[in-house]
Image (cartoon, helix red, strand yellow):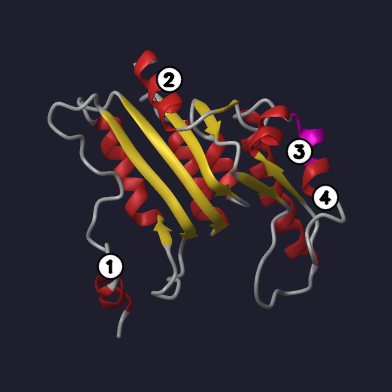
Amino acid sequence: MNEENERADRPGADEPAVPPVEEGGRGIFCLDIIGQIEGHYTLPPDNKTTKYEHVIPALVSVEQSDAAKGLLVLLNTVGGDVEAGLAIAELIAGMKTPTASVVLGGGHSIGVPLAVSAKRSFIVPSASMTIHPVRMNGPIIGVPQTLSRFRRMQERINGFITANSRIDEGALRSLMFAEGELVTDVGTVLSGREAVACGLIDCLGGLSDALEWLENNQ
């Protein structure tokens, strides 16, 4: 089975990434980022994924829509493809349409830039966020160029996070390279309150808080 047919067989393959605004609504579009961020390689069909080739044109449509008064981004993601996640985050950060994000459950790994990409970020107290350095599954070429590529990619991610939140570079790196909290890895798991306290997320809050902010900033 080729890749195109495999995608077509998946549940929800033809569903829009951003549902249309209903007649009589308040013009708030909703984008849910769940499971793994799927990039250039197709993940197994039983994985719950957010496909960047669906999300990117949907964001462009929202930005061009006269009906769009705001974009609500709901996140519950374990991370995924770094390039795809950062591409989506950059698009959200560059929108003139008011944007708000809510971390529900988890906003891990590349989910961190996605969470801070909105103009206003919220997190529920029960949610968590995992911050760790860039890592790659599978074999890699053990040459200095590989390490240099990882370092430059990490700098891009760190630069985006610090530019779109209140956390500074030093604090971010301390969380990223902390030892003793993650099994077989370095990094830090933050609760909702801790994510706000360190300046990563703007404030504690849920759906109604994000909607209220969007309605007041149209």
Element type where label 3 sits in the image: helix
C-alpha span from label 3 to label 4? 9 Å
Residue placed at 69% from the left, 62% from the top? 135
Element type where label 4 sits in the image: loop
Quadrant where the N terminus sits is bottom left
What percent of the width, then of the height, locates residue 203? 59, 26
- The mark closer to the camera, 2 or 3, is 2
In this image, 102 relative to 144: left or right? Answer: left
Q: In this rendering, is residue 29 above or below 87?
A: above
Element type where label 2 sits in the image: helix
Query: In the rendered structure, which amino acid carries the disc numbered 1?
Result: Pro
Q: Which residues are magenta?
A: 167-173
What percent of the width, then of the height, locates residue 188? 76, 48
Query: In the rendered structure, which amino acid carries the disc numbered 4?
Result: Phe
Q: Which residue is mark 4?
A: 177
Magenta region's main secondary structure? helix
C-alpha span from label 4 to label 2? 34 Å
Q: Which of the pair 75/52 is nearer the observer?
A: 75
C-alpha span from label 3 to label 1? 38 Å
Element type where label 1 sits in the image: loop
What percent of the width, then of the height, locates residue 125? 60, 36
C-alpha span from label 1 to label 2? 33 Å
Query: In the rendered structure, which amino acid carries the disc numbered 2?
Result: Trp
Looking at the image, the residue that sits furthest to the bottom is 1
Q: Which residue is mark 2?
A: 213
- The mark closer to the camera, 4 or 1, is 1
Nearer the N terminus, badge 2 or badge 3? 3
In this image, 170 relative to 98: left or right? Answer: right
